[in-house]
Amino acid sequence: EDIRLAFLNISRIMDCVGCFKCRLWGKLQTQGLGTSLKILFSERQIEALPTSNVQRPSFQLSRQEVVSLLNAFGRVSTSIRELKNFRSLLAEEG
C-alpha cells in the first residue's frame, strides 16, 4: 500500500511538469514500474488463480497497465543495450 501511494504521489508531482510529452512519457514509465511491482508483490494472488475459466480471476491488469509495462520493458531493454555499447567503446579506448 505504501508503494502504491508513493507512485501516486510521483504521478501527482509529474502533473507540474510543463512539457506535455515529458509529462506523458514520465507518467507512462512510472506506471510501468508500478505495474511491475504490482505483479511482483501479487505472487499469492497469481498462484491462487483458478485453472479453469469458470471463476473470475482475482488478479487482473488493466489495458493501460499492460501497455505501460511493455513500454517500460522496451525502455529498460534499450538502456541495457546502450550500456553494452558504451562499455565496448570504453574497452576499445583502454
Image (tube, rainbow, N blue to C red):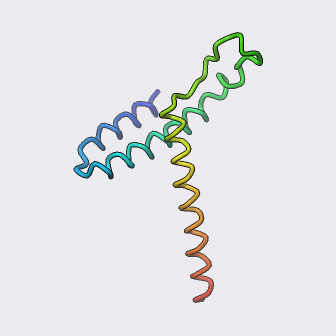
Q: In the rendered view, would you say 64 is above or below 91? A: above
The answer to whether 53 appears left or right of 15 in the picture is: right
Relative image position of residue 44 (x, y in whole percent):
67, 24
- In the depicted view, which residue is nearer to us: 27 or 7? 27
Residue 42 in which image quadrant: top right
Residue sitting at x 32%, y 47%: 23
The answer to whether 48 appears left or right of 2 in the picture is: right
Relative image position of residue 11 (x, y in whole percent):
35, 39
- In the depicted view, which residue is nearer to us: 20 or 41? 20
- In the depicted view, which residue is nearer to us: 4 or 58? 58
Relative image position of residue 14 (x, y in whole percent):
30, 44
Residue sitting at x 49%, y 41%: 68
The answer to whether 23 appears left or right of 66 in the picture is: left
Outermost residue to the right: 51
- In the depicted view, which residue is nearer to us: 22 or 80? 22
Relative image position of residue 71 (x, y in whole percent):
51, 47
Residue sitting at x 45%, y 46%: 29
Residue 76 in which image quadrant: bottom right
Count the marks: how many? 0
Q: In the rendered view, would you say 39 is above or below 69? A: above
Please identify the quadrant where the C terminus is shown: bottom right
Outermost residue to the bottom: 93
Outermost residue to the top: 54
Residue sitting at x 59%, y 65%: 81
